[in-house]
Image (tube, rainbow, N blue to C red):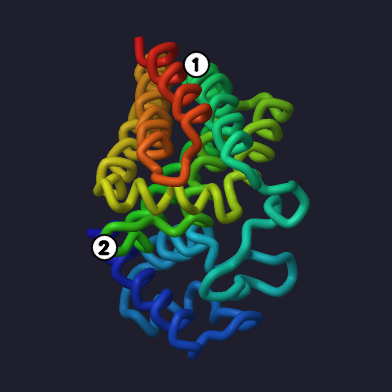
Amino acid sequence: METTAGLRIAAEMRARVDDGRWPAGTVLPTELELAREFAVSRPSVREALSALQFAGYVEPRRRRGTVVLGASPVPTAARHVRAARTHEEVVDLLEARLVLEPAVLALAAADPEPRALDEAHDAVAGMALVTGGDTIPADTDHRLHAALAGVCRNPDLREQVETLLARASGPRWRETQAAAWASGAAKSWTDDHREIVAALARGDGKAAAAAARRHLLSAVDNAAACETMPPSQQRRLHRLREHFGS
């Protein structure tokens, strides 16, 4: 019941951000005030705020409270890292993520950071909240992958993953995303994320890595199907599929 209530009021809060009733910079009421307004418990309010935070709608700030970032915030890391601008760079990025992310998640499962694992659960809830129809907002997908990497205790590995995620932007990357949505990948990708979090929670590194690899290979397949992808890069993508899919 608490989870249902939390996601329900998160959807109501998100609607207020989207329609401008809570514009960027708004300081939200306290947990107690929100609990009274929505007639729910404070744990439900905390769950809703966590989902909104990892969807990129709000951010807790010291001495101010929870502040609205806006309806379509840009991840902070993306402001400082160059986007993958060419098809070759898109393939480079997918290759790097295939090497790094499954290994980081396998390591994380052996000794997960408890608070980060809770945050990863919240991030999955946030993705479920904002996933509409056949698409997943790019910033939401990035935040979820960053939350998953956050379960790993090694800060250098976390930083490497976050840097790669920040590069996953720009028109060429969006072309591959459009190919993914056209193939109906949104639901399966959301399911992949749930499976990764579940594997981390039970300490199954092999399953976490396999789910991450399968998820990224789906992105490889969709990139290969992109009509604008040059033949030379399509061949690279097919080699990635053969190498990592075996």
- Count of numbered circles on the image: 2
Pick whichever, 110 or 189, lies toward us.
Answer: 189
* Residue count near mark 1 (Cα–Cα under 10 Å), binned few <14, some 14–19, many ≥20: some
SS for dot 1: helix
Q: What residue appears at the point 62 percent right and 43 percent down from the top-left corner?
A: 86
* Residue count near mark 2 (Cα–Cα under 10 Å), binned few <14, some 14–19, many ≥20: few
Of the numbered discs 1 and 2, the one sitting upstream in the chain is 1
Pick whichever, 171 or 73, lies toward us.
Answer: 171
Q: Residue furthest right?
A: 80
Between the residue at mark 1 and the residue at mark 2, the CA separation in whole angstroms equals: 35 Å
In this view, 206 is above or below 60: above
- In the shown orientation, is residue 97 left or right of residue 222? right
The residue singled out by tag 2 in the image is 133
The percent coordinates of residue 99 (x first, y second) are: 55, 19
Q: What residue appears at the point 52 percent right and 30 percent down from the top-left corner?
A: 233
- In the shown orientation, is residue 146 left or right of residue 199? right
Q: Residue furthest left?
A: 1
Q: What residue appears at the point 60 percent right and 29 percent down from the top-left corner?
A: 92
Numbered tag placed on residue 110 in the rendering: 1
Q: What residue appears at the point 54 percent right and 81 percent down from the top-left corner?
A: 29
Residue type pointed to by label 2? Gly
